[in-house]
Amino acid sequence: MREMGFADTEQERLKYAWELVVLFRHNAAELERYARGLHIVITLMALLTTVCAVLVTASHEEPREPYPNSTVAAEAEATVITFDEALSLDPSSQRVLSLACAVVPMLSAFLLALAHKFSYAKRWAMLAVAAERVSSEIYLYRARVGDYQQRTKNAKLAALVGKLIAD
């Protein structure tokens, strides 16, 4: 037997459950945006670290002969491209690049720690799963299946009625 006002409270329960689904999906989308943005920034910082390291290393190198004491040296000189002119930096630029080589990896490490601490991707996945679980429970409830199917109070009587109907 249903309780008094069951239909009214049922509508309220369903409305609240759908509000939860909307809230979970909204928050999951927000966390997905944070997770993807942080991942992109971390990737760009790693790329910037590599570029800075390569530039500092290349700017410290001395110009060399491409093929010393070789018979193909004359032919090779025409095809070898050297970047000695492009990578010769003045001392202030050299200091800035060296400083960038020191600071950018620290920022990258900080962002990695931030990503690990707040676990945006993990929380995003948990909220997306929670939204789908609540949605699934709503449909199970509305279809009156599983835990939500109506049960009779007297199982023995229901079995006897079922047996009589079958005969």
Image (spheres, grey):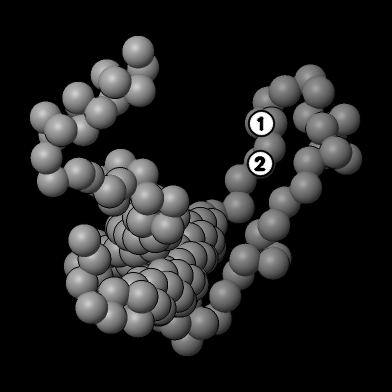
Quarter of the image containing the N terminus? bottom left
User: In the picture provided, is 66 more to the left or to the right than 107?
Assistant: right
Query: Quick check: marks 2 and 1 in contact, CB under 8 Å?
Result: yes
Give coordinates of residue 5: x percent, y percent: 28, 81
Give coordinates of residue 134: x percent, y percent: 35, 60
User: In the picture provided, is 87 more to the left or to the right than 82?
Assistant: left
The relative height of residue 134 versus residue 96 in the rendered view (above or below) is above
Residue under circle 1? 68
The relative height of residue 41 versus residue 164 in the rendered view (above or below) is below
**Kind of element beneath mark 1:** loop
Instruction: Using the image as rendered, state which of residue 49 and residue 115 is in the foreground.
Output: 115
Callout 2 amino acid: Glu
Callout 1 amino acid: Pro
Q: Residue at x 47, y 86 (%)?
A: 92
**Kind of element beneath mark 2:** loop
Q: Residue at x 66, y 59 (%)?
A: 84
Instruction: Using the image as rendered, state which of residue 127 and residue 33 is in the foreground.
Output: 127
Give coordinates of residue 86: x percent, y percent: 69, 67
Res 72 seen here: yes
Characterize the local packing of mark 2: few (<14), some (14-19) or many (20 or more) Cα atoms within 10 angstroms.
Answer: few
Mark sitting on residue 65: 2
